[in-house]
Image (cartoon, rainbow, N blue to C red):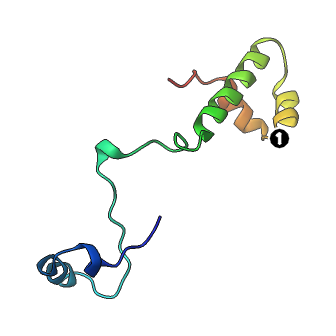
Amino acid sequence: MKYVKATAILPENLILEIQKYIQGETIYIPKKKASHRKWGTRSGSRQAIDERNSAIRTAFKSGRTIDQLAEEYYLSSETIKKIAYSKMRH
């Protein structure tokens, strides 16, 4: 996230209005809902995790134990259980 000086992009009357509520602080202005991306979609992390989870579910259905999968994927047994018993993300 990059910071932009308000005086460089906002009209003076808007800055004066904002100063009624906050001065000299950093504020975050979120994107509109329509332009918001879900976590990991830009970097590919979400896809990688979904593929890993799918592999874990497949291995579990093929007979691998929770403990074996936890050791193989470096995850806790509880995390493996959540993945193994959950439905695939869409």
x, y (%) of residue 29?
A: 32, 64
Front residue of this view, candidates 62 and 26:
26
Q: Is residue 16 above or below residue 86?
A: below
The residue where tag 1 is placed is 74
How far across and down, in percent of the image, does residue 22 sit?
26, 83
Judge left or right: residue 57 versus residue 29.
Answer: right
Position of 74 relative to 30 (above/below): above
Task: Tell whether 75 sits left or right of 38.
Answer: right
Q: At 28% across and 50% down in the image, what residue appears?
A: 32
The amino acid type of the residue labelled 1 equals Tyr
- Measuring 62% from the left and 30% from the top, which residue is drawn there? 50
Secondary structure under the numbered disc 1 in the rendered image: loop
Q: Where is residue 71, by image quadrant?
A: top right
- Tell whether 5 sits left or right of 87: left
Q: Residue furthest top?
A: 62
- Check the image and report above or below for 50 versus 9: above
Q: Nearer the viewer, residue 55 or 66?
A: 55
Q: Residue at x 77, y 19 (%)?
A: 60
Looking at the image, which residue is at 33% across and 45% down?
Answer: 35
Within 10 angstroms of label 1, few (less than 14), some, or many (20 or more) residues? few
Toward the front, the furthest residue is 8
